[in-house]
Amino acid sequence: MTDFSISKRTLIKTAGAGLVTSVLPTWRRAEAATGSFDLIVVGAGTAGMPAAIFAAERGAKVLVIEKSPVLGGTLDRSGGQMSASRTVFQKRKGIEDSPDAHFADNMRINSWTADPLVTRMFVDNAGESLNWLAANGFEVGEDHPVKGAGHEYFTTARYQWGKDGGKSILATMEPLFRKQMDAKRITLLLNTGAVDLVQDKSGRVVGVTAEDESGKLTDYMGKNVALASGGCASNPRMYQDLHGVSLTSQIAYPYSQGAGFTLGLAAGGYLRGGQNYIGSFGGILADDNYPSTVEGSFEHHPEIRQPWEIFVNARGERFMREDHPSIDYREKALSRQSGQRAWVVADQEMMDKAPTWVPRWGKEKVMGSFGTHPMFTKADTLNALANKAGINPAGLAASIAAYNRSISEGATDAFGKLSRPAKYGKGPFYALRITATQLKSFAGLGIDEQLRVIRADGSPIAGLYAAGEVIGGGVTGGGAYTNGSMVTPAISFGRMIGQKMIKVGA
Ligand SMILES: Cc1cc2nc3c(=O)[nH]c(=O)nc-3n(C[C@H](O)[C@H](O)[C@H](O)COP(=O)(O)OP(=O)(O)OC[C@H]3O[C@@H](n4cnc5c(N)ncnc54)[C@H](O)[C@@H]3O)c2cc1C
């Protein structure tokens, strides 16, 4: 696992000003340099594959270095939900749309926390990416495009995905990639990780040092290097350093270790965007060994299940309107709580009468989890429940008393909760701990409008590009789960690096 605490900047500073610089200590340098490529792509995933395909289709000699044994990266698990205007999918439904409208919707949903310049590039190029996929056989659901699903909705239907989510995108791109391999324009190295960038005296990136399975290091020389190695949402230490929160859950691709962050930093780049962090709502973790498996999700969408219960934090205090219609509101509220956690609390009547907490599990499994699952607690009294679950007992008692009093008096709920079918009555009492979960990094490398990795002063590092989650999810999605704001720009920006508009060799 990458140890972010090792300062590669320190290493590079002490490396002296040789002909080429490296963040690797001298005993770790490759013995020989090999090949000369127009483009070296680090990572054969969502962004890396189109970068390689488009460059190779234009005659470039491309090397793709991939740490895992397979192509596709996060597409193996991603929902693959994409957003774009002026697509063939919109056209066949007669939907009028524009990049301007997409931009406005995107920025509205994330309250202008995304980077407007990069978002503009994302929306301006999204349609072409979808149309490229469509021209190569990609198909979406019959009712697509839609306005949204699961998160805040667009005002226009521009959101779609394939029947197998991210895998449908991979199935479309893989034959194009393999065709270029057959034509000897793409060389693919699997089970090989980029561990360093080679820079010349001027700071220009001129190659990549890669380590194969046997531990052998090789320097691959190239005119341009594209970092497309994903984010760091499988690296707890780095995630915490960059976002200021624990990585509670293991959802991301296991190879999302943040290697590109370290490589970009060492070459002189900088990281930004961690402040945009927001977790997903309702996760039921397997245990407290972070990052933990997510075993299920509490059904918190009020349009599916109106909450009878209140939610409290570790102090036993309510902190949100439990039936708020905005998922963005709910996600932000939970993410701000100590430990990013809260408890759903119910009495026996609620457990008997309210719809089950986890529809996918069914009532029987939910009830069977009390006493067997660490996130589920049951006790005869509220005081005992609080003590067992780890909630402040006095705070919980006060919150329940205030909630009951407000219903008795016919007063408006303190948080505006409208769904109040019952007061809390007799025990036993029940609690479920829910925790904010993470599937992507929000922080990433700073880039310019040509997708070049930049220094903190805005100057580009010659020869070094980046696309995908390595530039940070917050840059196009902001501090929200903005529809399709990861996969769509990853494909577009990868494509743009590969295209001649960003001239190979420039
Ligand atoms: C469960 C889940 C659902 C999601 N759903 C959506 C969605 O519906 N819509 C959306 O927009 N976003 C979604 N996302 C986010 C989105 O899928 C990702 O942000 C995006 O796919 C990342 O693309 P990437 O190219 O940056 O990284 P990846 O696709 O992960 O590719 C990076 C590649 O680099 C390789 N690599 C890593 N380190 C090295 C190294 N040192 N050397 C060489 N190779 C290396 C990895 O093995 C990997 O193959 C989802 C994410 C998850 C986890």
Image (tube, rainbow, N blue to C red):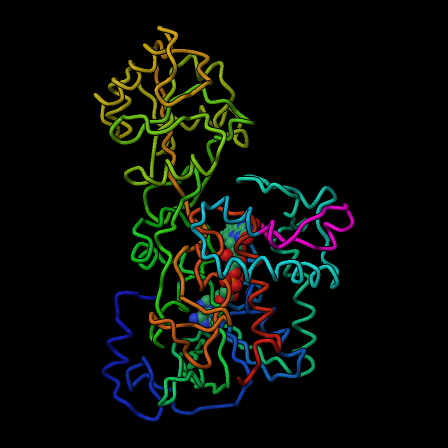
Q: Which residues are magenta?
A: 78-102
Q: Is residue 477 above or below residue 28?
A: above
The residue most toward the left is 394
Q: Quadrant of residue 176?
A: bottom right
Q: 97 or 479, which is in the foreground? A: 97
User: Any magenta on residue 81?
Assistant: yes
User: Any magenta on residue 390?
Assistant: no
Q: Residue at x 38, y 85 (%)?
A: 199
Residue 67: in sight, yes or no?
no
Instruction: Residue 477: give x, y in percent of width and height.
Output: 48, 52
Instruction: Residue 253: give x, y in percent of width and height.
Output: 48, 57
Q: Is residue 395 above or below residue 67?
A: above
Q: 207 or 368, which is in the foreground? A: 207
The residue most toward the front is 100
The residue most toward the top is 409
Q: Is residue 49 above or below residue 364?
A: below
Q: Residue at x 37, y 36 (%)?
A: 333
Q: 291 or 243, which is in the foreground? A: 243
Q: Residue at x 50, y 67 (%)?
A: 467
Quadrant of image for the N terminus: bottom left
Instruction: Residue 326: give x, y in percent of width and height.
Output: 48, 33
Residue 108: in sight, yes or no?
yes
Q: Residue at x 43, y 35 (%)?
A: 329
